[in-house]
Amino acid sequence: MSKKQQLFRLPDGTVAELEMHSVEQIIKDKGLDPGGDVQIFHTQNVLRRIVKYMPFKTGMTIKVTIAQTNVRKPFIITNTPYAQYLYRGKVMVNSKTGKGPAIIPGVGPRYRKGTTLKATTRPLEYNKTKNPLAGPYWDRRLKAAEGKALAADVQRYIDLKGGGKK
């Protein structure tokens, strides 16, 4: 942690010396760097709030999202074969046949293993019984509905840590 020193000459001829850490060091000390306290708080807060905008049938997509997201990074991860079509909100069909999945008794709709899918222009119909706010583009929906609250939460967190403006 080296400090930078700068000399300043004031209008009256006085020489002043300023010693301070680099901007990068100050950002890190305040927890504002990637992986810092503030980033972790914000990612956890987004993850906690975004689930109400995600489709919920069995809850597996939400559980996978929580398990796959590293809160030290500024990303919410949902890495499953079906996540993209749920996120974009478009019905998917077999790219070769143009047909939907086969209905398997006791299991539900399933595509054959290895089937390549393509999106249609038809919107997906989300079951909103458990999550009434569910729909496509979860992150955008969260930002539109709760963006100001998220920003206020981060500011309160910074203030409580002693790093924000009073």
Image (tube, grey):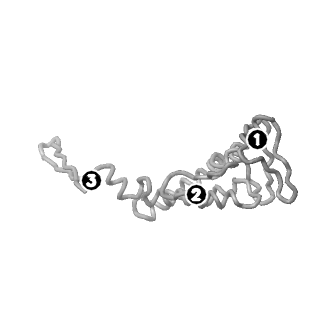
**Amino acid, disc 3:** His
In the image shown, does 34 or 12 lie closer to the viewer?
A: 34
- Whole-angstrom CA distance, mark 1 to mark 2, is 24 Å
Secondary structure under tag 1 reads: strand
* Tag in front: 1 or 3: 1
Dot 3 crowding, Cα within 10 Å, few <14, some 14–19, many 20+: some
Secondary structure under tag 2 reads: helix
Q: Which mark is residue 68?
A: 2
Q: Which mark is residue 82?
A: none
- The residue at which mark 3 appears reads as 21
- The residue at which mark 1 appears reads as 92
The quarter of the picture where residue 7 lies is: top left
Q: Are marks 1 and 2 in contact (CB under 8 Å)?
A: no
Secondary structure under tag 3 reads: strand
**Amino acid, disc 1:** Met
- Whole-angstrom CA distance, mark 1 to mark 3, is 54 Å
Rendered location of residue 165, percent (x, y): 41, 56
In the image shown, does 134 or 13 lie closer to the viewer?
A: 134
In the image shown, does 46 or 79 lie closer to the viewer?
A: 79
The quarter of the picture where residue 107 lies is: bottom right
The quarter of the picture where residue 93 lies is: top right
> Which quadrant of the figure contains the C terminus?
bottom left
Circle count: 3
Looking at the image, residue 41 sits to the left or right of residue 1; the answer is right
Marked residue nearer the N-terminal end (1 or 2)? 2
